[in-house]
Image (cartoon, rainbow, N blue to C red):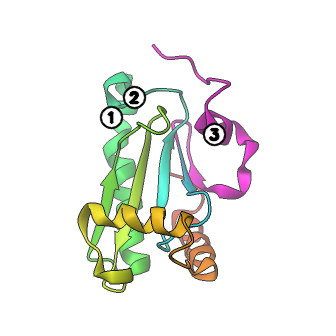
Amino acid sequence: MAEPLAPECSLCACVAGREPEGVVAENRLWQLRSLPAPVPVPGWVMLVAKRHIAGPFEFDDHESSQFGAVLQRVSQALRKLTGASRVYLAVLGEAVPHLHCHFVPRTDDLPGGVKGWSVFDLQRRAIAGELEPDAAAVAAMLGSLRAELGGVL
């Protein structure tokens, strides 16, 4: 079984409370949080395991039984708040080998009408300064999502 926290892991630092401003909702197992700025899509959030694990293959029985319900609850809240026709979910874990799941609401007004994996190009473009995210819309959506979820997953 993996260690509860890894000192060198940036996501362990987040779930340990070193970046509380990014927290949207949480429970004993999971923390839902904003992406680091710049965030190109209002409602793009990450679900982070509170235990330092690399992926679902390391879930204990309780994590396994709760994961689907949390994915459903967050996805439903994002659809309700954004009007998204889809909420993309991605679990990769290569850049940061700590289980985290990206939720990206795909609305009709995404820049360039991107769909599918191309949505991740929006984040790269925002980081490169090629795309100017609407920080006020991102902050407002985070507030709405916090209220919708009541701070608890």
Q: Residues within 10 Å of mark 2 (few under 14, many from 20)?
A: few
Q: Is residue 131 above or below residue 153?
A: below
Report the amino acid beneath label 2. Answer: His
Report the amino acid beneath label 3. Answer: Val
Q: Which residue is mark 2?
A: 62
Helix, strand or loop status at disc 1: helix
Q: Is residue 147 above or below residue 153?
A: below
Using the numbered discs, state the Cα–Cα distance from disc 3 to disc 1 in whole angstroms.
21 Å
Q: Residues within 10 Å of mark 1 (few under 14, many from 20)?
A: few
Report the amino acid beneath label 1. Answer: Ser
Q: Is residue 2 magenta?
A: yes
Q: Which residue is mark 1?
A: 65
Q: Is residue 72 left or right of residue 31?
A: left
Q: Which residue is mark 3?
A: 15
Say which residue appears at 62% left-offset and 77% top-offset.
135
Would residue 110 be seen by someone viewing this image from the given angle? no
Q: Quadrant of the N terminus?
A: top left
Find residue 25 and report its image quarter. Answer: bottom right
Using the numbered discs, state the Cα–Cα distance from disc 2 to disc 1 in whole angstroms.
5 Å
Q: Is residue 25 above or below residue 42?
A: above
Say which residue appears at 25% left-offset and 71% top-offset.
115
Q: Is residue 54 left or right of residue 118?
A: right
Q: Is residue 117 above or below residue 20?
A: below
Q: Is residue 119 magenta?
A: no
**Image x and y of residue 97, in percent:** 47, 32
**Image x and y of residue 61, in percent:** 35, 24
